[in-house]
Image (cartoon, rainbow, N blue to C red):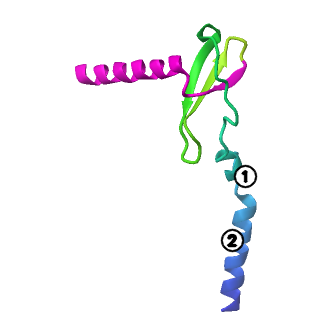
Amino acid sequence: MDMKLLAVVTVLAMATYYVPQSQAKPISLVERCSCRSTVNSLPRGIIRELRFIHTPNCPFQVIAKLKTNKEVCLNPEIRWLQQYLKNAINKMKKAKQTA
């Protein structure tokens, strides 16, 4: 009985030694919100792209990549951003209806 237990422990030890390390981020970094502070006003002309992030532990986040390659977090309550989102949702609804 002891030999079987020793064999199992040896196999498990070897398996954990030869398993490649994961390249994933630790859970504490994955669950961290990207936006800790937001900008309340930003001219639309300097924005290159927008990213929308919704994670379970964080509020709705909007990240704007500027033409200077800098990224800033926008306040999702900005009036022009709210209108942009409404237009995008309406456009998606129309596309689904025609499909």
| Residue 24 visible in the shown view | no
Place residue 4 in its image quadrant: bottom right
In the picture of the structure, the residue carrying the numbered disc 2 is 12
**Amino acid tagged 1:** Gln
Report, in whole angstroms, how far the alpha carbon at label 2 lies from the one at label 1: 16 Å
Place residue 70 in its image quadrant: top right
Quadrant location of the C terminus in the rendered image: top left
User: Which segment is the magenta one?
Assistant: 70-99
Under circle 1, the secondary element is loop
Residue 18 coordinates in the image, percent (x, y): 73, 59
In the picture of the structure, the residue carrying the numbered disc 1 is 21
* Earlier sequence position, callout 2 versus callout 1: 2
Q: Which mark is residue 60?
A: none
Residue at the spot x=59%, y=43% of the render? 58
Q: Residue furthest bottom?
A: 1
Quadrant location of the N terminus in the rendered image: bottom right
Mark 2 closeness class: few <14, some 14–19, many ≥20 residues within 10 Å: few
66 relative to 52, above or below = above
Place residue 96 in its image quadrant: top left
Residue 32 coordinates in the image, percent (x, y): 67, 45
Residue at the spot x=67%, y=35% of the render? 35
